[in-house]
Structures are given as structure tokens and as C-alpha cells.
Amino acid sequence: MLIDCINWRMENKIDTILIRPIAPAELYKAVRDSQLLGFTYDKSPVDYYVQSHIQINEYRDRVVFPQATKKYGRYIGTCLKVFDMTGLKLSAVSQIKLLTTIATIHDLNYPEIVVTYYVVNTPYAFSKLWMIVKKLLQEETQRKIQVLKEKVQGHLGVP
């Protein structure tokens, strides 16, 4: 797994991904804004979302974790992720390829970084989508995912 991860990093030039912007700038902004708003992955081709997702992970690992480790005087190398499904529609089924690609990248190249995934504000359509996507994830990843059925506003009580 380590050799595969190293090969993936070299083949995809991951060590330089933070200096490779998505061009044009308007497209880059649309990609980032749509990720911050939830699963609205319809502003650009799939590969731009994958690149942006990898950039976010690399920034977290190279910048955020080391700064937090220094600030709190102890090693910080794990996190949680919150997926806000507000606005998800059944048409999002077409995004399964993107979601499974991102999940596979996480499983193979960023293992043990995310302790828990919280999925919040899930609409009715999510249950159908989740039944399909869940089967495509590794069992360990499935166990990390917590789907919160009630509406969530504000924060999850995370410091």
C-alpha cells in the first residue's frame, strides 16, 4: 500500500499540487465555492474537483496539521470531516463517479487521517444514493461514517 501511494504521488505530481492552480481563476472559484456549499459538483469537469480535493488534503497535511501541532504542543495528525447535504437532489446520483473517486483516493492515499465523517442535513434522496455509494467503500471507511438524520445548524460541538 505504501509503494502504491508513493507511485500515485509521483505519477500525479502530488508534491507540487499546491502550486498548480485550477485555471481559469473563475473556474477555480466555482469549484471551491461549490465544495464549501455542499455536494454541488456541477460547475466543472470531475478532474478539477478531484484536483481541488487533493489540494485541500495536502494543505491540511502540510500546513494545518504542523501549525496545530506547534500551537498545542502535541502531535495533531487526524481530523474529522463534515459533509453538509443541504440542497442535495436525486440528480446527484450522476455524481457517484466523483464521490467514489474521492473516497478511493482517501482510502488508498490518506489512510487513518480522517477519524470520522459526519454526514449532516441529509434529504430523502440521500438514503437511495447512500445505499449505492456505501457498497463501493471499504468496510473500515464505512464504519467511520456517521449519518446524522436530524437537521444540524451551527457546529457539532467540536472545539
Image (spheres, helix red, strand yellow):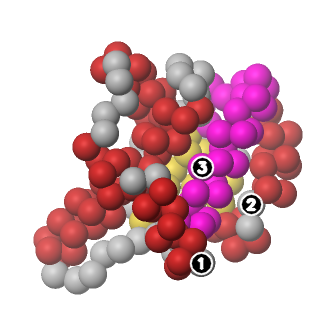
Horizontal and vertical percent for residue 66? 22, 69
Q: Is residue 17 magenta?
A: no
Dot placed on the residue nearer the N-terminal end, 2 or 3 = 3
User: Amino acid type of disc 1?
Assistant: Met
Image quarter in which the N terminus is found: bottom right
Pointers 2 and 3 in contact (C-beta within 8 Å): no
Tell which tag, 1 or 2, sits nearer the viewer: 1
In front: 23, or 103?
Answer: 23
Which residue matches tag 1? 1
The residue at which mark 2 appears reads as 137
Q: Secondary structure at mark 2?
A: loop
Q: Is residue 33 visible?
A: no
Say if the magenta span includes residue 100: yes
Residue segment shown in magenta: 85-109
Of helix, strand and loop, which mostly describes the magenta segment? helix
**Dot label at residue 102:** 3
Q: Residue furthest bottom?
A: 74
The answer to whether residue 74 is visible is yes
Q: Which residue appears at 76% of the width and 71% of the height?
A: 139
Q: Position of residue 10 (x, y in %)?
A: 43, 61
Tell me the distance, in whole angstroms, between the alpha carbons under discs 1 and 3. 17 Å
Tell whether label 2 touches label 1 (CB within 8 Å). Answer: no
